[in-house]
Amino acid sequence: MVLSRLAGVLAPPLCVSCGALAPIGRPLCIRCADTLRWLGHERASPGGVVVWAPLLYEGAARDIVAAVKFRGAVRLLENMAAQIAASAPPELLRAAHLVPVPLHPARLRRRGFNQAERLAHELGVRTGMPVLDCLERGGPGSTQVGRGRASRARATGGTFALRLGAAPPRRALLVDDVVTTGATLAACADMLRRSGSERVEAVTYARTPGR
Ligand SMILES: [Zn+2]
């Protein structure tokens, strides 16, 4: 705590959206935090998977997601998980395994971490829910898949499979940083259901409006 305060004095925390001074431990300055659009308990089902997210994917929320992915600001994931845990519908974060959406191996090598896996871990710490990293992602356009699945693979940037030796959870809560079309979540949910999961829902930090 003392060390983090000292770090705050030496390198004052800056808002990831506008660069102004931010309160210590917060990703956004007060002005940008005020622009976040909270979604309440309302769920959406883009791509057919029921998903809940605390925030609309726009403006400052979009900047937070980008800072994690493209600037390696992994500390922000703690804040994102805390916001999910604090505002989720209570029945969502119970009796399920958190299953992170896997990153394509080439992208994982470039980025060095999977933001969905880190977010699931931070959410697990806050909720006591176990994390089961049971999915893996293959390359897009695999020749082994049928036509329908091949077009879905293009839409999601890859194909998904159960990791060797992994057992799918009975109830899964997929975790990703953001959902837009829902194609990736749908492909993961499809894989889990075909492997035996009875119930698959999803949680993300932000989502696009509607759907
Ligand atoms: Zn700001």
Image (tube, rainbow, N blue to C red):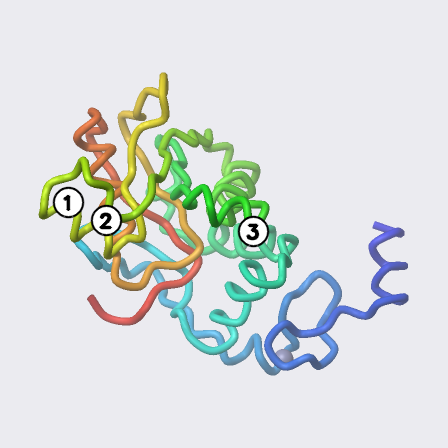
* Amino acid type, mark 2: Ala
Displayed-image quarter of ligand 1: bottom right
**Horizontal side, residue 22 vs residue 191: left or right:** right
Name the residue located 31 percent from the left edge and 34 percent from the top edge: 172
Disc 3 Cβ-to-ligand 1 distance below 8 Å: no
User: Which disc number belongs to residue 211?
Assistant: none
**Residue in the foreground of this view, choosing between 126 and 173:** 173
Q: Secondary structure at mark 1?
A: helix
Q: Are marks 2 and 1 in contact (CB under 8 Å)?
A: yes
Q: Secondary structure at mark 3?
A: helix
- Count of numbered circles on the image: 3
Q: Residue 186: image x %, image y %? A: 22, 48
170 relative to 109, above or below? above
Q: Residue 160: image x %, image y %? A: 29, 38
Q: Residue 100: image x %, image y %? A: 41, 40
What's the CA distance linking mark 2 and mark 1?
6 Å
Name which of mark 3 and mark 2 comes first in the sequence.
3
**Horizontal side, residue 143 vs residue 146: left or right:** right
Q: List the single residue furthest toward the top.
A: 165
What's the CA distance linking mark 3 and mark 2?
21 Å
The residue under label 1 is 149
Q: Would you identify the image quadrant in which residue 139 lies?
A: top left
Name which of mark 1 and mark 3 comes first in the sequence.
3
The residue under label 3 is 111
